[in-house]
Image (cartoon, helix red, strand yellow):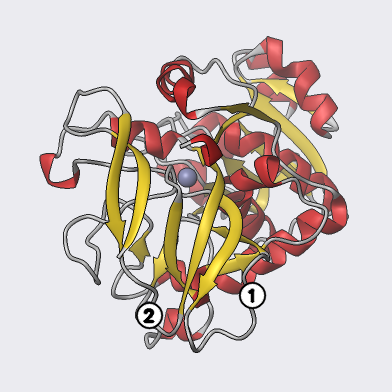
Amino acid sequence: MIETTGLAVPRPGAAPQRWTFDRRDPLPGDVVVRVTHCGLCATDLHALRGTDPAVFPLVAGHEMTGVVDTVGSEVTDLVPGERGAVGNIVGSCGRCPACRAGRENGCAEYPTLTYGGPDPHLGGANRGGFSSHIVVDRRFTYALPDGLDPAAAAPLLCAGVTTFAPLRRFGAGPGVTVGIIGIGGLGHLAVKYARALGARVVAFTTNAAKREAALDLGADEVVLTRDPDAMAAAFRTVDLLLDTTGVALDLDPYLRTLVVDGTYVLAGIPPEPLRVDPLSLVVGEKRIAGTGSGGVPVTREMLDFSAAHGIVADVEVVGPDRFTEALDRLARGDVRFRFVVDVTGL
Ligand SMILES: [Zn+2]
Ligand SMILES: [Zn+2]
């Protein structure tokens, strides 16, 4: 077993604390990554502040960068000392049509998530990236391309692929107008990717204070969504909307901004059902789609694209001793735009 130190919430409602636990010894196809940085995603906050006792003690974190420590006997294309990265999927069946198509995030047997789900090797709940080491199937361990700062690149492994994958899948590029709803952890990366892909980018935000930030990130235009005149002026101007808010929006004002055949893509996960007037879809023959994480091929493409275009997250790096503060500030939306925990001090 590999003795690992993590930042764990021991039981529902408790504060995070250092905790030592065992990882499995590497199987022939495994890679052991010594984690240096792990991004803090809204999903982590919800999990760590959740109430299901079955998943505690809970070590969250699913956006990791680090250094390959050791590899299993069958791993030949990653070597100790090389930089590595791990996202929010660490296993899948490998046999279903989705897996065979490189869409492992859609595995018919449900992918093995990095933490909080059943650990197929050791039993119990598996443990995430706010920890000193992680043992991962080679298929889900990525080489971190040269030039990407390991702290600022960590959020690419969840927020990056969750925004890059749908922009690619739905054709963001030259001649296409992309609307990004919400300029936060996901949205700020979405603006950068859409811009780098060559699209015209419109940022939709409730927050007038984010106007300048959105323009700095690469938006061509900012629409303040609480201004009915601004929303009306955007009527039928957007080809593709990517909603990163995680809030159950009233979709109708947004769907009115889509052109005929336009697509609204849900990237965040609202806590309640969506509300939509059927006529908002029928008139203009529009689509609602979902997206979440990405399979192995698009994750690799995202990392290469990020390195080629110099795209990383805008991050505030904190040490393990500021983990609780980071959770509190994320809960208040007080971060620009992503916390990353430097776990080398664990
Ligand atoms: Zn995430
Ligand atoms: Zn599968």
Kindly identify which residue carries mark 2.
27
Tell me where residue 46 appears, x and y as whole percent: 33, 33
Q: Nearer the viewer, residue 271 or 93?
A: 93
Question: Number of labelled discs?
Answer: 2
| Residue 161, quarter of the rendered image | bottom right
Q: In this image, 153 relative to 218: left or right? A: left
Q: Amino acid at mark 2?
A: Leu
Mark 1 lies on residue? 79
Image location of residue 132, percent across then percent down: 45, 48
Residues at circles 1 and 2 in contact by the CB criterion of under 8 Å: no
- Left or right of 117: which side holds 312? right
What secondary structure is marked by label 2? Answer: loop
Q: Secondary structure at mark 1?
A: loop
What percent of the width, then of the height, locates residue 190? Answer: 68, 43
Q: Residues within 10 Å of mark 2 (few under 14, many from 20)?
A: some
Q: Residue at x 72, y 30 (%)?
A: 203
Q: Earlier in the sequence, mark 1 or mark 2?
A: 2
Which quarter of the figure is the C terminus placed in?
Answer: top left
Residue at the extreme left of the image, as rendered: 53
Which corner quadrant holds the N terminus?
bottom left
In the displayed structure, would residue 317 be above or below residue 71? above
Amino acid type at image mark 1: Val
Q: Quadrant of residue 61?
A: top left
Give the residue displayed 75% in from the left and 17% down from the top.
211
Q: Which mark is residue 118?
A: none
Name the side, left or right, on which 266 lies relative to 178.
left
Q: Position of residue 262 (x, y in %)?
A: 64, 52
Q: Closest to the observer: 252 or 44?
A: 44
User: Is residue 256 in view from this perspective?
Assistant: no
Q: Is mark 2 within 8 Å of ligand 2?
A: no
Which residue corresponds to the image point at 61% horizontal and 67% vertical from the top-left?
142
